[in-house]
Amino acid sequence: MFISNAYAAPASATSDLMSFLPLIVIFVLFYFMIIRPQMKQAKEQRNMIAALQKGDEVVTSGGIVGKVTKVADAFVTVEIAANTEITVQKNAIQTALPKGTIKSL
C-alpha cells in the first residue's frame, strides 16, 4: 500500500493543565480588574442610599442637585429650589454631596 497508518501521540496529563492555564489566568485577571471593583462600588452605592437622611445634599442620575426633605422606603423627596420639591426613587440618587455644596453653586 501507498498510505501508511498515522498514530496519535500518547496524551499526557501536564499538557491538559497547560492548555487551561491561560483561561484560568484570564479569569483571575478579569475578577481582580473588573468584577471585584464593580462589586465594591455597588456595595458603596447601596450603603450610601441606605444612609440617606433629611438634610443631605444629593445629585440624581438625571443631574438634578437638591436637598433631601423626606425619606421613605422606596422614594425620596428632594427640594431643588425654594418651595419646589420632586419625588424620586432612592435608586435614582447617584451621589451624596458634602454639606454646603448647593450654596456654592
Image (cartoon, rainbow, N blue to C red):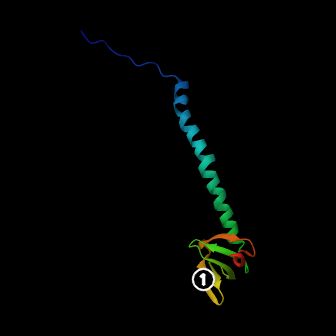
Quarter of the image that includes the N terminus: top left
Quarter of the figure that contains the C terminus = bottom right
Point 24% across, 10% down: residue: 2
81 in relation to 2, above or below: below
Q: List x then y, in percent, for residue 46.
A: 66, 66
**Residue underneath mark 1:** 87
Residue 71, position as x, y percentages in the image:
68, 81
Give amino acid for label 1: Thr
Quarter location, residue 76: bottom right
| Apparent side of residue 75 relative to residue 16 in the rendered image (left or right) | right
Q: Which residue does the image show at 64% across and 81% down from the upper left?
A: 78
Q: Quadrant of residue 45?
A: bottom right
x, y (%) of residue 22? 54, 35
In the rendered image, the residue lying farthest to the top is 1
- Name the residue furthest front: 104
The residue lying at 55 percent from left, 29 percent from top is 18
Q: Is residue 39 above or below residue 20?
A: below
Please state the horizontal and vertical placement of residue 104, each as a whole percent of the image: 71, 76
* Image position of 64 with respect to 25: above or below: below
